[in-house]
Amino acid sequence: MSDFQYKQRTFALDDLEGQTKALHEDGFALIPGVLSAQEVQDVRDGIDRLRPFGFDHVSVNEHYKCVFNRDRLFLDMLDRPGVVDLAESTMGAQCHIIGSSAWRSHPGHNGWSPHTDHILVTVPEEVASDPQSFPIYLCTAHYYLDDITDEDLCPTYVIPGSHKSGRGLVWGKDKEPEWHGKKLEPVLVKAGDVLFFRSEIWHTGSLNKTADRMRYLLQVHYSHRTIAQRFSPFPWTFNPEILAVANERQLRLLGKHPEGAYG
Ligand SMILES: O=C(O)CCC(=O)C(=O)O
């Protein structure tokens, strides 16, 4: 029997209310068991097939951007039941994706660089602590594709509640940030779990201390419709084979919105 224990509170896939509350209180919601073992293997195999171009980076860390445009397998990760429902209920029925990245982090990869992904406005703590005044605009879903049950395989670290600081961290400067006495803590997970987190949360990657294991990770970045998509390389071209198989919800997530102000 495994004695693995989550360090943060977890939510059932259909507990939309609990997850939403957690996004306001903690800045993230940890959702176990979103993908089956077979789905985890399929996504890992898909990542193994990726080849770099455009803004992709390949070194001790491999990072591939906009993977939904390359393989239907990744397109189908955009509207996973439960996860996409959380995106829509928090960021609106017209929410879309602004990107989706796949990672293979090799032994020696050091992702330690505490940061915030995006801060729209810097506000006082009392404003950032009020869900009405500080709505959710941008979130990332991390699909973990390995068991990360100790700190060796570069877990993500977070400071719960740090989005309520109302301010961002300076990339590369704040190496050991603290917020209200809380330090960065590792998010330990099982393969198939999802961490859904706000862009304002203080978080970081970490060091892959293993001798021979790569960490596989898939990210889906969701935002309110008003936030611009980061599709690269320029000029952006949708893959016609992907558009041909995408369902209506996926097409909307890719940017097929009804006519509105400005366009
Ligand atoms: O590698 C990780 O777990 C964290 C990734 C991250 O912080 C990011 O993409 O903003």
Image (spheres, rainbow, N blue to C red):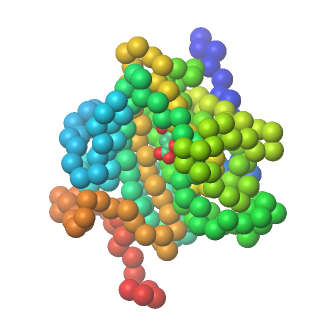
Between 241 and 199, the one lying in front of the other is 199
Residue sticking out furthest to the left: 240
Rendered image quadrant of residue 214: top left
Identified at 59% across, 66% down, the residue is: 120
Between 247 and 148, the one lying in front of the other is 148
Above or below: residue 6 compared with residue 63: above
Left or right, 109 with reference to 234? right
The location of residue 95, given as percent across then percent down, is 48, 67
Rendered image quadrant of residue 251: bottom left
The location of residue 106, given as percent across then percent down, is 37, 26
Q: The C terminus appears in which quarter of the rendering?
A: bottom left
Q: The N terminus appears in which quarter of the rendering?
A: top right
Identified at 74% across, 51% down, the residue is: 25
Identified at 39% across, 76% down, the residue is: 257
Between 60 and 217, the one lying in front of the other is 60
Above or below: residue 168 compared with residue 257: above
Left or right, 60 with reference to 183? left
The location of residue 184, given as percent across then percent down, is 67, 36
Kindly tell me whether residue 219 is visible in this rendering.
Answer: yes
